[in-house]
């Protein structure tokens, strides 16, 4: 087939640039500027999809975003596959590969179509009623195991691609004074007015070419010029204004609080291929001072039996295919309508050579300018029409209808054009939380009171007709500009000729359809909802329109009821014997049209998904083959395997070497806060459980921070540098939380204190040197400090120099060995680390990672906040209550320590667990129980918090929280596991060097 | 700079920074940096000692020669002294402030400076920064703490198409990569 | 994303720069040791969670760093008043509520 339905005209087409594409494997031709839908119609393709439930053959109904049927998958190489696209919005490009959906094995022969024959069985609520049992093997067994998988196979829309998407997606925040949604006549008039004020104006349109209805406006004149000429001049004028941005192919899909609107801008396939720097889509999060909604209106289908046959199309869509794309939608057309606009379509089609057999008007009379012009053009018009039958399965072949004059007749045709009038597109207005009102005269919902700084103009405001739309757009643009604080220009009159007003319309279904149990008169094409389904829902007790929607599924899925909502509402109203406003409208929710996952994800994938924080020493570790683990956003060296060494072997060696000689550890990720001011000590005294007033400058203390509820929140070494200056360390993950917690109390409770907090986490690289040879390792590098035990004992801090740069040297230990932490300005972290490394190598030392650190601290019974604790653990539970400043009157968390549940006697306490078999390593998180086989649902005594193989002890060790654990030392308990219970004995949590002689060496 | 036996390292040293006409990134020269905290008396004394005015409220940064004072909060400023030695500059400021309670903390190594420039500089920053960066809303000289996506930054406008961004050093490679990605194919204007 | 007026910056700033700090005007007792267990539990755990006007704390954490209070209508999400920490709750009552 070679574009047999292509005729002259087609404002959108570039006839000099033919393209070829395939649909379901068949090659076709088209032109640049076509949509996939217009090109398929030009090639005479009428069957484009199968319906969701009954698998009925479906064709193209519309020419825009409201298309319910022509959903296709579009591919351009591996990973570049997008399902569920509306063919009416897919720009054609050379090499496009499109395929239909929801059919198997093929579009023409679809096994699922048997559902159509079984349709009496698949009414509204069918899924809810049918698939509830039997529950032979547990609740909903049948649904989960049998029905749902089968239904998913049979139904479902397009498939997701299986390869990663190779295209880029970006997102930007943006701001403007006036945001105009829609570049039809009202939107353009608004843009011209607002643009002239100097305001920052953004105009978006969902289509590749701005213009809206003007693109198909063949006869009208605006200000004495043909509409197309006026459009071109208006666009040129806007493009010369630096304060106006025109964004075609941009869908405004969400309208949120405070004029925050979400835009998805598509980049066309040819542009994307030509420029590899372009993204496929841009997501714009736009904050607008003022918004003008000029989103137009959508033509409403009529509800009659078999109104879903391929070839049944909205009348104005047929006109748009003719004028915009040079496509006639058939050779012989019948028009059925309740609105004058369809006459215009009939006139235009007749001029293009289509044989218009009859305009069948459902109304009692057809008067006014458009019916008059149609009759004058020789088109037969009949009124009081009633549709009875549409013949033809894969495309329309004939219609049977009754009308006056002439009565019942059957007319052969290949296109059936319909119009039930126009529904204002109030989706975005409704999303903005504006109140909709029902216009009795026009039978439409239209914008009422605004909730935000916006205004509607043109057809979306139920202001129909070109002249009125231009005038209202101009007024809206001026109003928006002045509301945004700009001097608006004077009103601009737009004289319009040759575009008489078109009136009329109907809602719901005609009387002879209502109550007909056999008619397949579709209300919602996409969800296969018929009149009888809506009636059944009401009959079965659904009253709220929200319930009717969910019971029937009308208005759901990708088209969100753009075509169906109003008809469904009218049918439900009749069935309930209520008025339409009484029944009410379902809520419009974002997105207006589906948005790709790519647009939402934007650049946040791979390395940009989250910041990856690396220490200054990271590259050194990476160069030596370290394995890393994620700790929050940080990458921390986990262990340093030598060639052919397993993780277990590496960790064992690192522990052994550190305890026997010396180990080097990157502790840079620890949080650090500098607390400075005359009241610094008093502040820490209130924020920590410990006492700080008497801590001497040059000394350190292990600080324990409680939440106000009395639970351990964070811990770390706190060094007093000067009477008014402390260096506070926090856990790696706790740094922001601790700083925020401190700021909260400082700003809102302890406002009497003169003290300030500054994060210094990243100011310092922290090089931990631990082990019996730690002192001799660092000594050659240090200047200005006496490292002797008496001069610089455990828990001390001094300013010194290392390798010629300043250091805050601390003598602290998290291994139980003699240890130092060399704090150096981060930019010197790596060279100082390398200098220490050279000294360390001479002494048989090694670098160790977080795993060895964890093992060694567990051997000493040192807790890790977040591992031994979970926000419900107290210092007493951990055996750390010795650290509490007993004489302090108050500190954060103190009052809670005497609450009844915190002093209860059966609390879980930190203990050590030793497995009977020393080679068995318990699982962290495993439950600890009294008996080997506890009865089902009996509460456990506690759980394992840490568990390792200890090289030092030559066996496994574990820490656990166990009810009244400290009174159970020596008891045998059990850890039940799938392979059988494991016997454990309860011990002290300190496994190694209980007296602490090593760290004081 | 301290009399160091070891060389200063940058978190960006292994990264290729974009350097095109539309968009360029460059690390700012080494500088002494402080976070200064205190009340009005301390602000006045520090302004005199530092040599650049510490602004009293959100707005333009105080700037004199190669020193800048950026308002971060009502009692918080970021002091940047290009090429200065932080130890001696810190001592000078402390000496002038003995009678006014305050906090002066050296953060020279906590963060780095990044010069973001070119016709799409503002657009690239707006990929992660939700502030209005139009010249009418964010004029040349304006400085504030804000965010870029998942990183906190201090943003200081140096020209119509140039921004100085301060970012914690471990977030710097992420910021560089995210800005470069956002600038690629970004529309101007 | 909301725009939140910060009384210390003197301008509206994007929500992403802020952290919510829960209900405002829950003062820590000056002498917690004198508070009964029941009253202490009330202070720790019980919040009003109103539908309508709520006084709540926000911190401009990635801006000026300050805590402050706002009155927000939890139905419309509108900010009705903004005031500095320590200042009394402005007299906006039920008329701001759109229950
Ligand atoms: Zn602020």
Image (cartoon, helix red, strand yellow):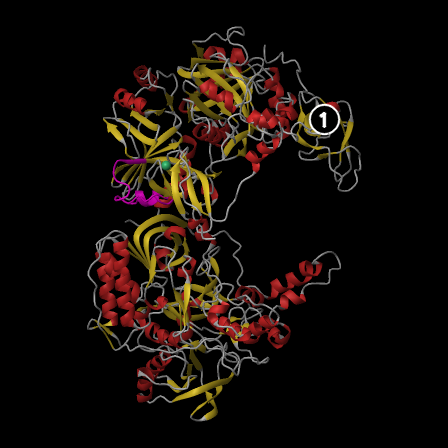
Q: Position of residue A159 (x, y in %)?
A: 54, 60
Q: Nearer the viewer, residue A305 or A25?
A: A305
State the quadrant of the N terminus of chain A.
Answer: bottom left
Q: Mark 1 belongs to which subunit? A: A
Q: Nearer the viewer, residue A676 or B15?
A: A676
Magenta part, dominant SS: loop
Asked if residue A25 shows in the view, the reply is no
In this picture, is A756 found above or below A605?
above
Q: Position of residue C32 (x, y in %)?
A: 55, 26
Tell me if residue A746 is in the magenta stretch. Answer: no
* Numbered disc 1: secondary structure: helix
At horizontal 48% and vertical 87% (from top left) the residue drawn is: A401
In this picture, is A856 found above or below B19?
above
Magenta segment: B119-143
Q: Quadrant of ligand 1?
A: top left
Q: Position of residue A362 (x, y in %)?
A: 43, 83
At horizontal 32% and vertical 67% (from top left) the residue drawn is: A458
In this picture, is C91 found above or below A420?
above
Q: Badge 1: how crowded within 10 Å, few (<14), some, or many (20+)?
A: many
At horizontal 65% and vertical 13% (from top left) the residue drawn is: A995
Residue occupied by mark 1: A965
Q: Position of residue C25 (x, y in %)?
A: 47, 36
Furthest toward the bottom, the residue is A406
Which quadrant of the figure has residue A431?
bottom left
Tell me if residue B120 is in the magenta stretch. Answer: yes
Asked if residue A473 shows in the view, the reply is yes
């Amino acid at each position: 087939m070679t574009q047999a339905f292509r005729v002259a005209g087609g404002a959108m087409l570039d006839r000099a640039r033919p393209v070829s594409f395939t649909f379901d494997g068949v090659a076709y031709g088209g032109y640049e500027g076509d949509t996939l839908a217009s090109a398929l119609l030009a090639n005479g393709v009428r069957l484009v999809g199968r319906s969701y439930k009954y698998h009925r053959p479906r064709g193209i109904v519309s020419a825009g975003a409201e298309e319910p049927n022509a959903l296709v998958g579009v591919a351009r190489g591996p990973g570049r596959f997008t399902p569920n696209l509306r063919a009416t919005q897919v720009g054609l490009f050379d090499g496009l590969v499109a395929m239909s959906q929801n059919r198997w094995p093929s579009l023409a022969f679809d096994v699922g179509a048997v559902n159509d024959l079984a349709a009496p069985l698949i009414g509204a609520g069918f899924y809810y009623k049918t698939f509830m049992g039997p529950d032979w093997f547990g609740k909903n067994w049948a649904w989960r195991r049998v029905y749902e998988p089968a239904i998913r196979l049979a139904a479902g829309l397009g498939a997701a691609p299986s390869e990663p998407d190779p295209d880029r997606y970006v997102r930007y925040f943006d701001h403007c004074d006036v945001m105009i949604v829609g570049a039809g006549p009202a939107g353009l008039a608004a843009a011209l007015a607002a643009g002239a004020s100097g305001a920052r104006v953004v105009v978006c349109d969902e289509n590749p070419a701005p213009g809206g209805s003007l693109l198909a406006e063949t006869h009208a004149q605006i200000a004495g010029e043909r509409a197309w000429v006026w459009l071109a001049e208006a666009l040129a004028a806007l493009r010369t204004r630096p304060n106006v941005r025109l964004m075609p192919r941009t869908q405004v899909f969400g309208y949120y609080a405070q004029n925050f609107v979400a835009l998805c801008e598509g980049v066309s396939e040819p542009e994307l291929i030509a420029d590899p720097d372009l993204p496929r889509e841009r997501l714009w999060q736009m904050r607008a001072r003022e918004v003008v909604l000029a989103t137009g209106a959508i033509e409403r289908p009529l509800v009659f039996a078999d109104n879903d046959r391929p070839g049944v199309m909205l009348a104005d869509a047929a006109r748009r295919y003719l004028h915009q794309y040079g496509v006639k939608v058939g050779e012989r057309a019948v028009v059925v309508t309740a609105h004058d606009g369809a006459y215009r379509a009939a006139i235009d089609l007749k001029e293009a050579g289509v044989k218009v057999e009859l305009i069948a008007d459902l109304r009692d009379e057809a008067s006014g300018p458009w019916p008059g012009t149609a009759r004058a053009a020789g088109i037969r018009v009949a009124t009081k029409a009633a549709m009875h039958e549409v013949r033809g399965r894969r495309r329309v072949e004939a219609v049977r209808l009754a009308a006056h004059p002439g009565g019942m007749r059957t007319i052969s045709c290949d296109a059936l054009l319909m119009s039930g009038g126009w529904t204002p597109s109030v989706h975005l207005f409704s999303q903005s939380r504006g109140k909709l009102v029902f216009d009795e005269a026009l039978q439409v919902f239209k914008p009422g009171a605004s909730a935000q700084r916006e205004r509607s103009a043109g057809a979306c405001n139920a202001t129909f007709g070109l002249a009125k739309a231009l005038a209202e757009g101009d007024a809206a643009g001026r109003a928006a500009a002045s509301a945004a604080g700009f001097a608006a220009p004077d009103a601009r009159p737009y004289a319009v000729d040759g575009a008489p007003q078109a009136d009329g319309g109907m809602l719901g279904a005609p009387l002879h359809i209502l109550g007909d149990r056999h008619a397949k008169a579709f209300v919602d094409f996409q969800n296969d909802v018929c009149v009888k389904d809506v009636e059944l829902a009401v009959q079965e007790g659904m009253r709220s329109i929200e319930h009717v929607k969910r019971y029937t599924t009308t208005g759901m899925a990708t088209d969100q009821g753009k075509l169906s909502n109003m008809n469904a509402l009218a049918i439900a109203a009749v069935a309930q014997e209520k008025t339409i406003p009484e029944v009410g409208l379902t809520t419009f929710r974002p997105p207006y049209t589906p948005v790709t996952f790519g647009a939402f994800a934007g650049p946040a994938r791979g390395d940009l998904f989250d910041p990856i924080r690396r220490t200054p020493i990271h590259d050194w570790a990476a160069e030596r083959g370290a394995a890393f683990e994620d700790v929050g956003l940080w990458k921390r060296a986990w262990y340093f395997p030598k060639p052919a060494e397993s993780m277990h072997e590496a960790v064992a060696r690192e522990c052994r070497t550190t305890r026997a000689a010396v180990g080097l550890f990157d502790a840079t990720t620890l949080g650090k806060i500098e607390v400075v001011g005359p009241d610094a000590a008093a502040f820490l005294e209130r924020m920590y459980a410990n006492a700080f007033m008497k801590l001497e400058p040059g000394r350190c203390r292990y600080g324990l921070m409680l939440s106000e509820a009395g639970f351990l929140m964070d811990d770390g070494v706190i060094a007093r540098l000067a009477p008014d200056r402390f260096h506070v360390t926090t856990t790696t993950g706790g740094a922001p939380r601790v700083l925020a917690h401190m700021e909260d109390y400082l700003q809102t409770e302890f406002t009497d204190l003169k003290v300030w907090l500054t994060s210094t986490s990243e100011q310092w690289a922290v090089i931990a040197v631990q082990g019996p040879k730690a002192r001799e390792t660092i000594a050659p590098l240090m200047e200005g400090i006496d490292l002797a035990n008496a001069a610089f004992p455990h828990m001390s801090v001094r300013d010194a120099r290392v390798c010629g740069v300043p250091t805050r040297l601390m003598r602290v230990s998290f291994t139980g060995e003699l240890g130092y932490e060399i704090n150096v300005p981060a930019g010197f972290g790596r060279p100082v680390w390398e200098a220490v490394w050279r000294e360390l190598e001479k002494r048989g030392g090694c670098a160790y990672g977080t795993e060895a650190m964890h093992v060694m601290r567990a051997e000493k019974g040192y807790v890790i906040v977040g591992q031994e604790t979970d926000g419900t653990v107290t210092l007493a539970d951990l055996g750390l209550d010795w650290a509490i400043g007993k004489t302090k009157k108050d500190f954060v968390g103190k009052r809670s320590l005497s609450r009844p549940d915190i002093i209860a006697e059966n609390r879980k306490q930190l203990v050590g667990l030793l497995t009977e078999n020393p080679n068995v390593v318990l699982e962290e998180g495993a439950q600890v129980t009294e008996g080997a086989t506890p009865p089902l649902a009996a509460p456990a005594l506690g759980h394992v918090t840490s568990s390792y193989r200890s090289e030092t002890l030559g066996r496994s060790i574990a820490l656990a929280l166990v009810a009244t654990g400290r009174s159970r030392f020596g008891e045998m308990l059990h850890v039940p596991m799938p392979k059988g219970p494991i016997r454990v004995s309860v011990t002290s949590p300190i496994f190694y060097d209980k007296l602490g002689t090593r760290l004081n060496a | 700079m301290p009399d160091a036996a070891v060389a200063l390292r940058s978190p960006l040293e292994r990264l290729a920074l974009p350097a095109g006409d539309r968009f360029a990134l460059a690390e700012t020269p080494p500088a002494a940096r402080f976070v200064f905290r205190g009340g009005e008396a301390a602000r006045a004394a520090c302004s005199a000692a530092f040599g650049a005015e510490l602004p009293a409220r959100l707005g333009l940064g105080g700037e004199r020669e190669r020193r800048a004072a950026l308002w971060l909060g009502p009692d918080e400023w970021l002091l940047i002294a290009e090429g200065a030695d932080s130890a001696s500059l810190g001592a000078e400021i402390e000496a002038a402030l003995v009678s006014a309670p305050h906090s002066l903390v050296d953060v020279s190594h906590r963060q780095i400076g990044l010069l973001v420039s070119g016709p799409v500089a503002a657009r690239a920053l707006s990929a992660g920064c939700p502030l209005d960066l139009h010249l009418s809303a964010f004029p040349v000289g304006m400085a504030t703490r804000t965010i870029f996506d998942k990183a906190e930054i201090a943003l200081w406008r140096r020209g119509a198409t140039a921004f100085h961004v301060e970012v914690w050093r471990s977030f710097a490679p992420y910021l560089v990569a995210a800005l470069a990605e956002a600038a690629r194919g970004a529309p101007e204007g | 994303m909301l725009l939140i007026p910060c009384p210390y910056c003197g301008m509206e700033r994007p929500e992403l720069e802020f952290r919510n700090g829960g209900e405002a005007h829950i003062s820590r007792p000056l002498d917690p040791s004198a508070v009964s267990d029941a009253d202490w539990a009330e202070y720790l755990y019980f919040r009003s969670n109103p539908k309508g006007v709520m006084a709540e704390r926000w911190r401009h954490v990635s801006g000026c760093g300050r805590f402050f209070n706002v009155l927000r209508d939890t139905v419309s999400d509108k900010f009705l008043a903004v005031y500095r920490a320590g200042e009394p709750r402005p007299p906006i009552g039920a008329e701001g509520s759109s229950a």
